[in-house]
Amino acid sequence: MQWYEHLFKNYACQYENESYVTGTPGEVDFIEKEIKSDKTVGILDIGCGTGRHAIELAGRGYQLTAFDLSAAMLRKARANARQKGVHIDFYRKDARRFRFKKQFGLAIMLCEGSFPLMETDEMNFAILQHIFRALQPGGKLIFTTLNGLFPLFHSVKDFLNEHGNLGSSKVNTFDLMTFRDYSEFETTDDDGQTLHLQCNERYYVPSEINWLLSSAGFTNISIHGCTLGAYSRNEVLTPDHFEMLVIAEKP
């Protein structure tokens, strides 16, 4: 079992207390703007977690299909959707090998939902390939991912400790040859049990993202700085951004 599977096996309630989940309405405002508030656009939420973006979008009248690898996160997502009185088609699927019979006008993959948590670049690329197949011609992909420029100028360990991401960072090693961050994290699950996690995440520089998306078939690729709760095409990506916002289209 990989570290992210171990973490999200019993972390749904804790996840919803994380600081980085508070910007959902503003992030959905941006998504709406990107599809011109067209309620006929079918939306696919990849790595949906507890469903925060999907539920906000469904509450605004959009048709949502969402999936995640974690059964526990999906149980919480379904309960949240019922509480909000919205209908969403939730599925348990692996982003590296998913398929749907229908295609979608928009795919979102936010807050490191699946990409770039995978163990290899090939796995991350497979996610983009499957998203491309899932989109209609003219469909759009919006996702956020770790900014490889950030660790070249900053300490990832200090950033994670300051912002409380997944708990406390004990050991943090960034490999300049692979742009992977190997770290030890300690956090607590929903039952109060302490988890010791050996994490491995891939940071990508903009040129790599552009190449991966182009190789998967995407065009009109646009990469920007990412501020939680305030996504914008006007935000220029810098080394001070921990994440980057990426928009691409299927021809």
Image: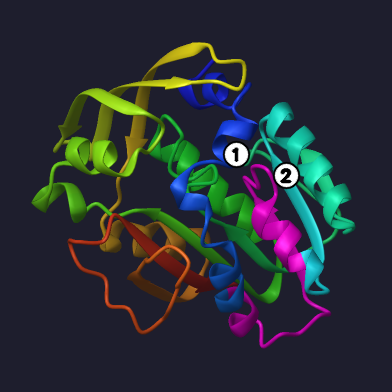
Residue 61, visible in the rendered structure: yes
> Is residue 104 visible in this depiction of the protein?
no
User: Mark 1 highlights which residue?
Assistant: 96
Q: Nearer the viewer, mark 2 or mark 1?
A: 2
Q: Residue 182 lies in what quarter of the image?
A: top left
Q: Secondary structure at mark 1?
A: loop
For disc 2, the marked residue is 67
Q: Quadrant of the N terminus?
A: top right
Residue placed farthest to the left in the image? 153
Whether residue 235 is in magenta: the answer is: no
Looking at the rendering, the stretch of residues picked out in magenta corresponds to 31-57
Question: Crowdedness of circle 2 by 10 Å Cα count: few (<14), some, many (20+)?
Answer: many
> What's under tag 2, amino acid-wise?
Phe
Total of numbered circles in the picture?
Answer: 2
Q: Position of residue 24 (x, y in %)?
A: 58, 62
Please, what is the three-letter code of the amino acid marked with disc 1? Arg
Residue 12 place in picture, x, y as percent: 64, 33
Q: Residue at x 61, y 22 (%)?
A: 190
Among the two numbered marks 2 and 1 on one chain, the one whose residue lies closer to the N terminus: 2
**Secondary element at image label 2:** strand
Q: Position of residue 238 (x, y in %)?
A: 20, 68
Which residue appears at 51% of the width and 62% of the height? 23
